[in-house]
Image (cartoon, rainbow, N blue to C red):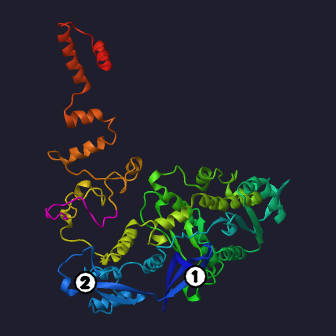
Amino acid sequence: METYKFWTHSTCVRNESNEGVVVKEKIATVDDNNNVTFHDSLNTIINPRRKFYLHKPKYRNYEYKIEYVPLSECDEYVCVNRDLEFTLKEKLHKFTNKYIPLRTLCDSPYVYGADVNIEVLIKIGYMNKVKNVPILPKYTFSSLDLEVSVLGDDQINLASYCFDRIVDVWILDTFLYKTTDEKDEHGNPKRVKATLDDVIEVANKEIGDYLERFNLSVKYHVVNTEMELILGLFKRIHETKADFCGVWNMPYDIPKLIERIEKNKADPSEIFCHPDVPKEFRKVKYVHDKSHVDHFTDSWDWCNCPGYTQFVDSMRLYSRLRKVKGREPSYTLNAISLKEIKHGKLDLGGTHYQNQLYNFLYYTAYNIVDSANVWLMEEQNGDVSSMCMLVGNSLLKDFSKQTVMLKNDFYEYCLNRGMIAGTVGEHMGTPYDDMIGKAGGTVLSPYLAKDMGLQCIEERPNLHTLVNIFIKDIDASSMYPYTMTGFNISKETTKATMVELDGMKNSAIEELFTAMIAPNENALLIGKKFFNLPTPSELIEGLHYEMNVKHNGEQWKTQSIIEEFNNA
């Protein structure tokens, strides 16, 4: 019997005395018959140690940062991660009592491997231990949806949680009313107290076919207080130990849960974190992505909370994984679930205020469908598994940060080849940067790739080839995303990029090869401008002349000439 530990997600928590990285492990056990079973575990690494490197003084013959150096040319240092800044400051002989941020210390061109997140280093360690194991971890997924009172008190009155085709729904009893045929003094339907049986009856009527179609079952919980609702919800989350919990538009639901727990004078960290998390490392912090984005689904909020379950924004994950295909007209849960599973949200047929006051039983069914749809779409699409694969050795919270992911990949790439990657400092410029022409921000013009390849031909040592190393990808102007998708352009399908033709200007080269993408449509332009071929009108004029000569000067009508030309 063999066991393998897979990294699922992690959270780093630092308190006054210690730092801990809590790793959710997916442990695979293979029995003698090669049957694989998985179970969940938490591994808390207290005060993890890390390495960083300084280039030895005898090799420091440069002034500005370089991308990588051989490990053999470096002095290696090991320290506790939380002491990294202090230790690095000491080794750089910066004698001051002031705290110096890591990014500032990395301004030194001789510091290497110091700015990779400790969680990334731990993840790389996990991945290296199972890189030759022919097993893929199976991630478990759950989904969550809340409804909040719009009657003035802002309480969470409904919460539903779906896991393994079971939907648990918690109903706040103070909202559990139904209407009668009678009217009150204001002409509105009279409200009377409803029971759990009423809830089940309406749910079976409204969504019975839906539950049967998708093989779902529902467990109902009526609670007396909002805090009882929240505690019941998290008790169920902790019982399932799901790897991920998807929330459609997470910036609303998770901060609302934190807000309401605090409103009830309780500690969100104690409720969000699983009891298996050591008490000193229980902490929850919701991080809003404040970066400027072109579309609201490009933002990537994150909930830092150690434990078995990591909250993810299913809406933004759905959008990010399909970004190259273009934007959807709408990212509402109704629109996307209707597209993916052919079943949208229930139609409320009125405002949230009206439904919470006069149609709460139907409103409960509405909440059940919302959480179940998110789970059903994940079951069908496997977006979480795609995210875990695409993020590589980086952290899930950095899934939207391509530069951070590139840095982590480059670090491991160098390390596997006896090299160590440089660091990113606070000031990365050089006095000569202004002399480099830039177009389109940091998007590369193909002409800048000319004469940049390796000089690797022994007979012609000064020749720059088209062989390049340490390039993650090339994003040429106006290529991403539609051109690359439409013409299947990628590193695997591209043989070369044309950057120079003898006797032709760069602008003409770009126009020629742009036109060659659609040669049939652009044949006239290519033929006339680049091969000096005649246009149709010039051909007709020449043919007209030949016909006149052929028929002894007789005048032929243009239409006859065109017909003969077409027949030819």
Range of the magenta residues?
455-472
- Numbered disc 2: secondary structure: helix
Compared with 462, 54 (above or below) is: below
Q: Closer to the camera, 174 or 300?
A: 300
Q: Main secondary structure of the magenta part?
A: loop
Q: The N terminus lies in which quarter of the figure?
A: bottom right
- Separation (CA) of disc 2 from disc 1: 38 Å
Quarter of the image where one finds residue 550: top left
Q: Which residue is denoted by mark 1 in the rendering?
A: 42
Image position, residue 170 (x, y; %):
73, 69
Disc 2: CA contacts within 10 A as few (<14), some (14-19) or many (>=20): some
Q: In which quarter of the image is the C terminus?
A: top left
Amino acid, disc 2: Glu
Give the structural element (helix, strand or loop) at label 1.
Answer: strand
- Image location of residue 254, percent across then percent down: 59, 70
Q: Residue at x 20, y 48 (%)?
A: 506
| Residue ID for mark 2 | 73
Query: Which residue type does callout 1 highlight?
Result: Leu
